[in-house]
Image (cartoon, rainbow, N blue to C red):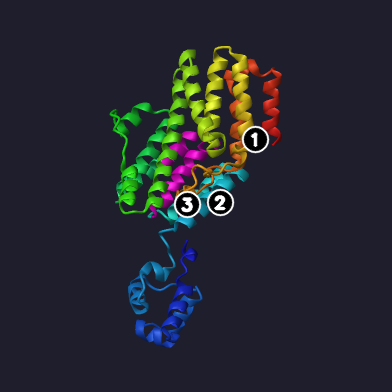
């Protein structure tokens, strides 16, 4: 809307900064003083052909003259993202979507912002009756960024998000078409950056990079174990062995505290596998572990380091969304409870006292 473009206020500001009167501006541009007065009071707007002349006089860009900021700072993007994420908790999804679309229209050339809107849609699409439509909107933004951005790093991130949106929409063939079928060897760019700092004599920075690499590999490894357990749920031997190895890693690095989200995924995935095989006690043991970590950490989840990973805090703060989760705490709590309460795999456990106790603990927090 035109009233979002603060051209009247800006003409006043830049005219005064330049130290000229309304009369002098009018004479320079070739209009009447009353025209300038109407511009500055937002009664009328300058003819489009006069805008370059005004910008030249004030030695500013057209965007500055019109008060339009197509690019947002990282902090602005975070602020808008979390504001909308909170609104998804409190308001009707369609109303929030309308607000999202307005932001997208306004900052359509700010690709970092569009990327965050993709993340927002992916993390809240389940709130809509037509989930597919929201996933389509996310993919449309991905395609725009790929076609218009010149940033290879951003495009790489967007391809991953597009693939994730296809996975959520259950379109495996399209994922393979997008990513191909060949698995590339793991990039060692980060390790080489760390080595460069070491060779430059900056041992502290090299250690920070090493910690960041370890942390990411650690989360990735346990995440892959969760996937392997789900894929081999029919094979108790693989489930037992994979959980045992992953659990030892969790204990060694205190993942219940360090990254509780990945820990609860491990406990839940394994509990589901045991429930399928009728291993009630083992399943309940893991559900209790899941509940304990959720109540203690997930409900107030933030990315953080610990005594061992003592140099990664600044890296977290520089991430797209900082240390906070991509969804509101209310939605996180709903999904945590639903993972037990509405999971058909746990139907045989619903009358068990231990299961009921876990649900009560999750719901009462």
Q: Main secondary structure of the magenta part?
A: helix
86 or 212, nearer to the observer: 212
Marks 2 and 1, how far apart at CA: 25 Å
In the figure, is residue 299 to the left or right of 53? right
Which is more N-terminal, label 1 or label 3? 1
In the figure, is residue 85 to the left or right of 351? left
Which is more N-terminal, label 1 or label 2? 2
Instruction: Report helix, strand or loop for mark 2.
Output: helix
User: Which residue is labeled 2 in the image?
Assistant: 83
User: Which residue is labeled 3 in the image?
Assistant: 314
Instruction: Report helix, strand or loop for mark 3.
Output: helix
Q: Residue at x 45, y 39 (%)?
A: 215
Coordinates of residue 310 in the picture (x, y in percent): 50, 46
301 or 74, nearer to the observer: 301
Q: Residue at x 35, y 81 (%)?
A: 29
Q: Residues within 10 Å of mark 3 (few under 14, many from 20)?
A: some
Q: Is residue 128 magenta?
A: yes
Q: Is residue 80 above or below residue 122?
A: below
Instruction: Report helix, strand or loop for mark 1.
Output: helix
Q: Which residues are magenta?
A: 110-138
For discs 3 and 1, the disc positioned in front in the rendered view: 3
Coordinates of residue 79 in the picture (x, y in percent): 52, 54
Query: Farthest residue toward the top?
Result: 278
Q: Residues within 10 Å of mark 2 (few under 14, many from 20)?
A: few
Coordinates of residue 304 in the picture (x, y in percent): 53, 45
Q: What mark, if any, has residue 317 been given in the picture?
A: none
User: Which residue is labeled 1 in the image?
Assistant: 295
């Amino acid at each position: 809307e035109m009233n979002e473009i603060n051209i009247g206020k800006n003409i006043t500001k830049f005219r005064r900064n330049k130290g000229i009167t309304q009369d002098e501006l009018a004479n320079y541009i070739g209009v009447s003083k009353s025209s300038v007065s109407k511009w500055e009071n937002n009664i009328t707007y300058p003819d489009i052909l006069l805008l370059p002349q005004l910008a030249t006089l004030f030695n500013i860009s057209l965007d500055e003259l019109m008060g339009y900021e197509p690019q947002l700072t990282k902090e602005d993007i975070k602020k808008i993202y979390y504001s909308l994420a909170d609104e998804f908790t409190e308001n009707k999804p369609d109303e929030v979507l309308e607000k999202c679309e307005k932001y997208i229209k306004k900052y359509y050339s700010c690709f970092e912002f569009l990327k965050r809107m993709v993340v927002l849609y992916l993390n809240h699409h389940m709130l809509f009756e037509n989930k597919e439509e929201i996933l389509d909107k996310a993919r449309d933004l991905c395609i725009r960024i790929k076609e218009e951005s010149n940033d290879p790093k951003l495009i790489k991130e967007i391809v991953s998000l597009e693939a994730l949106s296809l996975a959520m929409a259950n379109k495996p063939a399209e994922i393979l078409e997008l990513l191909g079928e060949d698995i590339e060897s793991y990039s060692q760019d980060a390790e080489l950056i760390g080595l460069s700092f070491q060779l430059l004599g900056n041992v502290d920075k090299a250690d920070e990079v090493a910690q960041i690499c370890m942390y990411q590999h650690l989360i990735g490894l346990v995440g892959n174990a969760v996937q392997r357990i789900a894929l081999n749920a029919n094979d108790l031997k693989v489930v037992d062995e994979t959980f045992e190895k992953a659990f030892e890693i969790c204990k060694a690095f205190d993942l219940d505290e360090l990254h509780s989200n990945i820990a609860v995924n491990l406990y839940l995935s394994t509990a589901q596998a045991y429930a399928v095989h009728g291993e009630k006690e083992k399943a309940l043991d893991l559900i209790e572990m899941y509940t304990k970590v959720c109540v203690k950490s997930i409900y107030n989840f933030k990315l953080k380091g610990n005594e061992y990973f003592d140099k990664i805090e600044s890296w977290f703060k520089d991430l797209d969304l900082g240390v906070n989760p991509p969804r509101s705490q209310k939605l996180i709590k709903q999904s945590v409870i639903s993972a037990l309460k509405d999971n058909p795999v746990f139907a045989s456990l619903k009358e068990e006292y231990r299961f009921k106790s876990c649900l009560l603990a999750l719901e009462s927090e």
